[in-house]
Image (spheres, coloured by chain):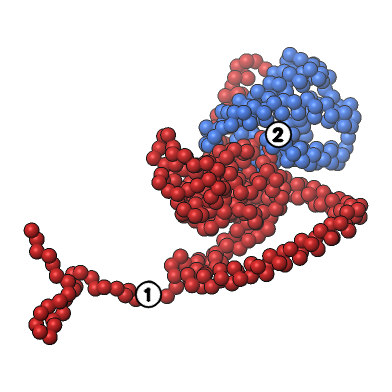
Chain colours: A red, B blue
Amino acid sequence: MTFRRLFLLAGTLFILLLGVYSWNQRTQALDTITTNVGLEAAGGILSGLRAVQDAVADIWSNYFALVDVRQENLSLKERVRDLEARLLAQGEALAELRRLRQLLQMPTDQAWRPVGARVLSGRLGPNGVLDSITINRGYATGGRPGTPLVTHLGLVGRVLRASAHNATALLLTDPSSRIAVLAQESRSSGILIGQGPGRDLEVSFMERGTDVAAGEILITSGLDGKFPKGIPVARVLSVAPSNYSQFLAIQAEPLVDLRHLEEVLMLEPTGVSVPNLPVGPPPVFVGPPAPGRAEPSVAPDGATSGPRLQPSR
Amino acid sequence: MSTFQECCWWLAFVMASIVAQALAPGLDALVVGILLLLQERNYKTLAWLLPIFIILQEGMGTRPFGGVLLWYLAVIASFKIGRWLFEVGNFVFIFLLSTCLGGAYFGLAWLLAPLQQTPAFDMNAMRDISLLQAVYMPLAWRILTLLRPGDRNDVSE
């Protein structure tokens, strides 16, 4: 092959690539196809292998690893007693919480339905540059793009791309992750930004003068419309005034161990809209009359009483 | 090897590669299959297997479509250039090619990061993955040539 032919071939390929790339950027047709086919196939293979792994692990744990069962049984009984005692102690607190919720007319959030999902792997392949995980639920099984992911400890991230039965979820540590948060005690709001895997998170746009302290928990504020309000996200590690802006420089760490995830809960939107305002008419305002509408009352002797204006000097 | 055996072999290869990729985030384990097919001059199999590899990798990833296509084109072009200079069945050739491809892997990721609006390109992490890729390829190639049935390795031109 001559140099001229090679040059022509390379040029044609380059133009073709650019054309395909631009067309896909506009239509996202190839992204959809590859996600539906590639992710589904890879997820299927990984799910199958996980099932085999589980079966082997079950056989091992049920038939071979029975050596410590008696000891474990004793410790579990002790733990059950301990938990029962704690449950009794917490019963009163739970009843109080119910009463307070009723008092505040705070409806239970029915807008989100939790759905369990299994983590199949971390990020996959040369194209997996974002900090992400692959889970075994897709748009047909409750994992549409944007669906929040949580564990019992707190927020994990949200679904980025989904095929029918598998999805790729963006973790909150990825630099492209932005979450509107609220400090749990001081109620200051900010934006939580990922800094990459294994690195601390950064909270931006939290105003100076707020009482945020190290150790405080950050929860989702729900202001971004992507996550339900009140999910614990991170713990504040350090607070200092920023050298570059009028806001605080806050470092935080995720509450969930994102490197060792096995199962997650997906919060699927139910379509039920929960009103933020209390139900019913607003309470009747009881207080002193407005100054402009104050009318002096006349006493029986003809003297007036009530608010008087001071003469100007 | 019959067509059925060939399909089974490649299916097993794809499954093993996906497991390897799940264990080592960022690694491209399927690329060794392309090297094997190029070495064997088995272009017929490459013609149907390459699109499958591209679809799988693009589907599993998080970047917009295009990165894997460029990466595999770079692999094929590097192999073709190397074939002019070296004997392709030689381990040294694969070692040198893997080193070059490790660099190409880093270069492509760096090039595509601003184009695909990757918010923060982590140089150190990508360097580690590229090194892993460069080390993985000759080792996997050696194991796969031993496992591949029949004597189909290419004789140098």
Quarter placement of the C terminus of chain B: top right
Residue lying at the far top of the rendered structure: B85
Quarter of the image holding residue B5?
top right
Q: Callout 1: 10 Å neighbours few (<14), some, many (20+)?
A: few
Q: Nearer the viewer, mark 1 or mark 2?
A: 1
Q: Secondary structure at mark 1?
A: loop
Q: Nearer the viewer, residue A42 or A122?
A: A122
**Can residue A32 be seen at all in this image of the molecule?**
no
Q: Secondary structure at mark 2?
A: loop
- Under mark 1, the amino acid is Pro
- The residue under the point 68% across, 50% down is A135
Q: Are marks 1 and 2 in contact (CB under 8 Å)?
A: no
Quarter of the image holding residue A266?
bottom right
Mark number for residue B27? 2
Quarter of the image holding residue A150?
bottom right
Q: Nearer the viewer, residue A29 or A292?
A: A292
Instruction: Please state the horizontal and vertical placement of residue B35, each as a whole percent of the image.
Output: 76, 27
Mark number for residue A283? 1
Q: CA distance from mark 1 to mark 2?
A: 63 Å
- Under mark 2, the amino acid is Leu
